[in-house]
Amino acid sequence: MKILLSNDDGINAAGIQALREAMETIGEVVIVAPDRPKSASGHGITVHKPLRVDEIRYSNSSTKGYAVNGTPSDCVKLALEGLLTKRPDIVVSGINFGPNLGTDVLYSGTVSAALEGVIHGIPSIAVSLASYEKEDYTLAARTAIQIVKAVVEKGLPDETLLNINVPAVPEKEIKGITVTKLGKRIYKNTFEKRKDPRGRDYYWMAGEAVDLAGDPDTDINAVKRNEISVTPIVFDITNYQLIKKLQEWNLSLER
C-alpha cells in the first residue's frame, strides 16, 4: 500500500511524525507537507509565486519527505501532479493539533489536503486530535491505521472523504467510534484595533468557538461524549433540493 501524508501544521509537526510512524507499519509512505504551519488556510492554492521543494530524510526510515513553501492543497496537488511517480492508494492528512469539527472544515487546511486527494479521485481521510493542549497522538495514530485499512479494503464513494476527530482523553475514557454528521459551530470574532509604528490602523483577529445546540448525532456532540467521530464529507455543495424551486422562479435576463 502506498500512502501519501500531508497536513497544515507543517512537516516538522509532532502530529504528522506520529502519523508517519503509524503508517509505516502498514505501507510505503511519502510525506509532502508545508514547510511551516499553514493552519486555517482553507483550500487556497498558490498561483502568484513559484513553489519550492526541499527533500527531507528521516533516520531509521525509508520514508521520503518533501517540504513545500505552499498550502496544504498545494502540497497534495504538487505531489500527485509533479513529485510522485506512482499514484498513492490513499491520502491521509494530519494528525492535526486541534479539532476540525462542524464548520471548521471550511477553514481547515487539514481537511483541504484530504479534499485535494478526493478531487484527484483518491480515497482520503483527515485526522485531528480534538485538543489545543494535550499532544498525545498515540490513540489518534492507531485510529488512523484502523480507518485506513477499512477504507482501502471497502472503498469510499466518489467525491467523499472521512473527517476523523479523536478526543484527547485517556483511552479508557473513549466510548467508541461513532459515525456522525457535521455540527454547527460559529466563532465570536473579536477584532482588536491597533496602530503600527507608522500610525496606520490594523486589526488583530481572535475567535471564540460557539457550538450551537442541536442534533446529538453531530461530530461536535460525539467528541463531547468522548466518542471518536467519523464524518463522511462530500465536496459537491450544490443544494439539489432548491434547484426545482429556483426553476419555478422563471428567471430570465431583463433586456
Image (cartoon, rainbow, N blue to C red):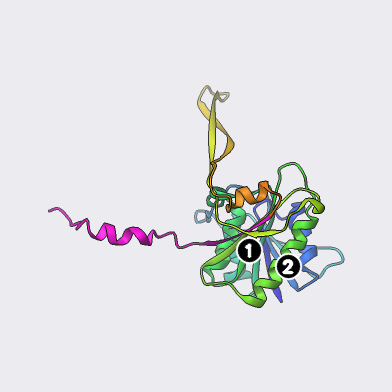
Taking the image as shown, residue 242 lies to the left or right of residue 59, namely left
Residue 125, compared with residue 165, is above or below; it is below
Image spot of residue 144 (x, y percent): 72, 63
Q: Secondary structure at mark 2?
A: helix
User: Which residue occupies 68% across, 48% down?
Assistant: 225
Indicate the amino acid at tag 1: Ile
- Residue 72, how many percent across, how many down? 60, 57
Q: Residues within 10 Å of mark 2 (few under 14, many from 20)?
A: few
Quadrant in which the N terminus is drawn: bottom right
Q: Is residue 237 magenta?
A: yes
> Given contact means CB atoms under 8 Å apart, are the residues at marks 1 and 2 in contact?
no
Query: Residue at left 66%, top 64%?
Result: 92
Q: Is residue 195 left or right of residue 222?
A: left
Residues drawn in magenta: 228-255
Circle 2 residue: 146
Above or below: residue 110 compared with residue 57 = above
Residue found farthest to the right: 60
Q: Quadrant of residue 89?
A: bottom right
Q: Who's the residue at 55% across and 67% down the image?
A: 118
Res. 12 visible in picture: no
Q: Which residue is nearer to you in this view: 13 or 104?
A: 104
Which residue is disc 1 drawn over?
125
Is 87 one of the magenta-colored residues? no
